[in-house]
Image (cartoon, rainbow, N blue to C red):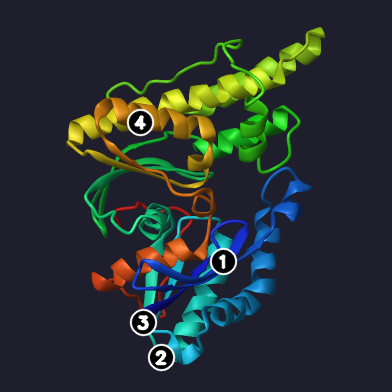
Amino acid sequence: MKILAVESSCDETAVAVVEDGRHVLSDAIASQVDIHALYGGVVPEIASRKHVEVIAALAEQALREAGCTRKDIDAVAVTYAPGLIGAVLVGLSFAKSLAFALGVPLIPVHHVRGHIAANYLAFPELEPPFLALAISGGNTLIVDVRDYTDMEILGATRDDAAGECFDKAARVLGLPYPGGKPMDELAQGSSGGVYHLPQAHVDGAELDMSFSGLKTAVVNLAHHAQQVGEPLDRAALARDFAQAVSDALVPRVMEAARRSGRKVIAAAGGVAANSLIRRDLEQACAQAGCRLYLPPLRLCGDNGAMIGAQGYYEYQAGHTAGMDLNAYATRDIGE
């Protein structure tokens, strides 16, 4: 089954062709990073307009690279939630028109489910049940993946997502947007242990997280150093910040694994590309005797292939939609 998949939830326009949920035939991506870097973050209206400009040509590119014609497509999958609402609407509207024109099913895919499904493309042997740590610019979740389309949130951030905090901390340190990779590279220049950053705990919900205090602490440290004329060890702060994020994520996902009895853990999302978090996950899983799946860096960020992968299993479960399908800025992964 060949699925043409569309992803436009933020600032990457992506169209892919995926066969049987596991084989990527093409994965075309148009990035807007250079545009939004001028503003230090994603400007929703600009993102939406850029999606409109490139999406049709990108779909043609994806078909061409896959060696397919429109007649070879059996279904169209699309991110319908969550994300920047204008951006999501562009991809959804295009996917609707394409599915209608081709006379094929329309498959709605939750963006975070797509990130988790990126692991199916990299690891053919991976099958549910397993535990997923989904960490990106807009979402930070610990998810019990009971089946391909049966998922439950065990823990989540109460405020900012981990990826958003990386971007804000990077801005304070004078690094370009998006901040994840520059922060990771800067952190390699220090062993850390210089700055003591806060750790938040949510009473009665030990698997939940909070990152707003951590973000504020980094801002205050940088501003204080500037005001009093003290030098700021940028590399050490980047390292200690990354360690603080990892210390919030890794112990909680391991505790979730203990409580749920899962012995397989998969990471997903853009923040899963961070080298320190990957290292800490590897060490924790080795200690606990858990099998860890870390997607290759190219599959950590937003892409169309992950939507095609999850779309296949949504279709197998009978999850298709009509032309009245709406877009949502927020949506629970279990819905």
In this rendering, the answer to whether 224 lies above or below 43 is: above
Residue at the image point whose x is 61% and y is 78% from the top: 61
Determine whether 230 is above or below 2 in the image.
above
| Residue occupying the far left of the picture | 261
Give the camera-side residue of 31 and 45.
31
Element type at mark 1: strand
Measure how far apart labels 4 and 2 are at the Cα level.
Answer: 43 Å
Q: CA distance from mark 4 to mark 3?
A: 37 Å
Cα distance in 3D space between marks 3 and 1: 19 Å
Q: Is residue 110 left or right of residue 154?
A: right
Q: Quadrant of the C terminus?
A: bottom left
Mark 3 — residue? 105
The residue that disc 4 covers is 208
Given residues 127 and 101, the one toward you in this image is 127
Label 3: state its secondary structure. loop
Q: Amino acid at mark 4?
A: Asp
- In the displayed structure, 102 sits above or below 187; it is below
Q: Which residue is mark 1?
A: 14
Does label 1 or label 4 sit earlier along the sequence? Answer: 1
